[in-house]
């Protein structure tokens, strides 16, 4: 996995597509969730120019801009949560946007985020 690549999981542990950010260690990594919801203060709108429409061979991605929002959190995920399928990719502009929106204080687990407790 490389920064800016968008994945879905074959497991039910993750429902939303996510953007890979970095490995935490051999078992865990950080990623940002993509959602359509705008009602949460942590959600920041992406722009169409933040998404690639196809891969290097010209095959269209299934996750492209669609009124998409970044959930402004670096969510800790486990590599063992099933098979991850690449379904999209951010442009360099999208990666830069992502990096500029996040800082280390935004790192948390899904359980903590879902419970409403800040990490």
Image (cartoon, grey):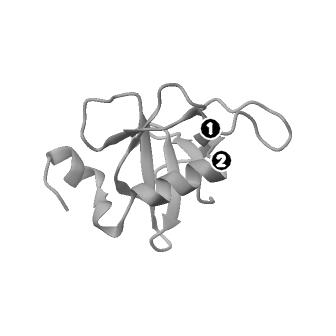
Residue at horizontal 51%, vertical 52%? 97
Circle on res. 91: 2
- Does 12 sit left or right of 49 as displayed? left
From where the camera sits, is residue 11 visible? yes
Could you say which quadrant of the image residue 71 lies in?
top left
From where the camera sits, is residue 78 visible? no
- The percent position of residue 108, horizontal first and vertical second, equals 28, 60
Which residue matches tag 1? 49
The answer to whether residue 117 is above or below residue 7 is: below
Residue at horizontal 82%, vertical 44%? 56
The answer to whether residue 41 is above or below residue 103 is: above
Q: How many marks?
A: 2
Could you say which quadrant of the image residue 76 lies in?
bottom left
Q: Earlier in the sequence, mark 1 or mark 2?
A: 1
- The percent position of residue 48, horizontal first and vertical second, equals 58, 33
Instruction: Out of 66 and 21, give the one closest to the viewer.
Output: 66
Circle on res. 90: none
């Amino acid at each position: 996995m490389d920064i800016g690549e968008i994945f879905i999981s074959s497991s039910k542990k993750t429902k939303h597509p996510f953007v890979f950010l970095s490995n935490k260690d051999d078992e865990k990594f950080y990623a940002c969730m993509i959602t359509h919801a705008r009602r949460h203060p942590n959600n920041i709108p992406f722009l169409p120019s933040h998404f690639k429409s196809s891969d290097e061979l010209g095959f269209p991605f299934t996750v492209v801009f669609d009124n998409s929002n970044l959930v402004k959190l670096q969510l800790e995920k486990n590599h063992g949560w099933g098979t991850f399928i690449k379904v999209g990719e951010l442009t360099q502009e999208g990666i830069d946007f992502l990096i500029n929106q996040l800082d280390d204080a935004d790192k948390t687990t899904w359980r903590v985020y879902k419970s409403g407790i800040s990490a």
